[in-house]
Amino acid sequence: MITFDSHSTDPYYNLAFEEFVFTRFREEDVFLLWRNTPCMVVGSYQNICREVRAARLWRMGIPVLRRISGGGAVYHDLGNVNYSCITRQEGGVDYGRSLAPILEALNGIGVPARKNRASDIAIGEKKISGSAQRSAGGRLLHHGTLLFDAGLEALEEISVRGKNDCVRTKGTQSAICPVTNIRPHLAEDMTVEEFQRRLLDRMVPDAGNRRELTAEEAGAVRRLRDGKYRSWAWTWGRTPAFVYERSGSFAGMPFRAAYSARQGIVAEAAIDCPAVDGALAARLRNGARLCPEGFAEICGRLAGERGQELRELLL
């Protein structure tokens, strides 16, 4: 088994890095470890507008990205370690087979972990890792999170309380489970960097199998990052069709809004509120692209200084 170091905590780069390694290196098994600055990563088939309050995250400076595998939405920060195992595909879906070497490595460095549910790893009854898979061309990508010293309060706020119940959609929905960090359960304390190093030593013990991308390969990763993972088409344009309906108050007045979206484009938009010009809202929003930046411009034109408040009611 070989490994590469991304040398980055940029989530856009790291998702591109993982996909590049998955599709480029066809003959050898590969193990990757990487960490991201705060972000939300949704599954390939998920509806962003259902999984998170996208406008709130945008205000917080937390980007939303879409990965190439299925499964649920996950919050990343620098206290979370992500792993990727890329191997030859053998038979059907078998999470137990993919998780076995990860569990052995974790147990070997003092983490009292066990398999839980179909694709999770737990300590006791609390989840420390979720995983997902993607297969293509006879290769299997199995990847997951490892909550080492993550901001669980932020995770709870964004991943659990941040669900948007105003959305009706058929997109894959995330399972909600109680979670814990690995660090408090260790007999011997260590930093996240030391944890990452020890885990890598277990999975790829031969230093000769630790490689670097060439300058040309790193350039290809950056092109994939910019052309795909930073693109509206990949992140928002793949959002499953949905209907959004919300009632409440805005500027101290009764408020009701509804719209539908397909392939990331808004249609049938209507706002009923004395504080908002409903006809103008419909003209501005029908045909608009889903995304916080676009909604920010529209809501600013509709509500002026209260544009942010309106945007968070609509997205």
Image (tube, helix red, strand yellow):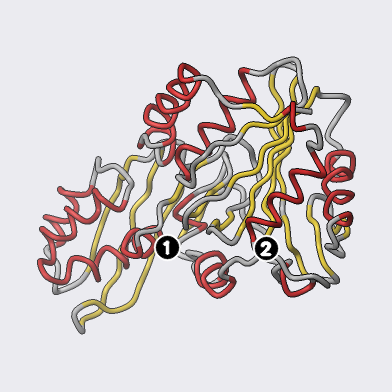
Q: Is residue 94 above or below residue 148?
A: above
User: Which residue is at a point 64% across and 48% down the rendered structure image?
Assistant: 82
User: Which of labels 2 and 1 is toward the front?
Assistant: 2
Mark 2 residue element: loop
At which x and y percent is residue 124? Answer: 86, 71
User: Which residue is at a point 53% across and 49% down the rendered structure image?
Assistant: 41
Q: Quadrant of residue 186?
A: bottom right
Q: Is residue 39 above or below residue 179?
A: above
Mark 1 residue element: loop
Any mark on residue 238, and which? none
Q: Is residue 116 above or below residue 133?
A: below
Characterize the local packing of mark 1: few (<14), some (14-19) or many (20 or more) Cα atoms within 10 angstroms. Answer: many
Any mark on residue 148, and which? 2
Amino acid type of disc 2? Phe
At which x and y percent is residue 171? Answer: 57, 47
Counting residues from the N terminus, which is met first, the one under dot 2 or under dot 1?
Answer: 1
Relative to the observer, which residue lies in front, 190 or 42?
190
User: Which residue is at a point 78% across and 43% down the rendered structure image?
Assistant: 201
User: Which residue is at a point 75% across and 15% down the rendered structure image?
Assistant: 27
Relative to the observer, which residue lies in front, 19 or 241?
19
Tell me the residue that label 1 is attached to: 53
Give left or right: position of 257 versus 128.
Answer: left
At which x and y percent is residue 46? Answer: 55, 46
Give left or right: position of 31 versus 161.
Answer: right
Distance in Å between CA atoms under marks 2 and 1: 25 Å
Count of numbered marks: 2
Characterize the local packing of mark 2: few (<14), some (14-19) or many (20 or more) Cα atoms within 10 angstroms. Answer: many
Amino acid type of disc 1? Arg
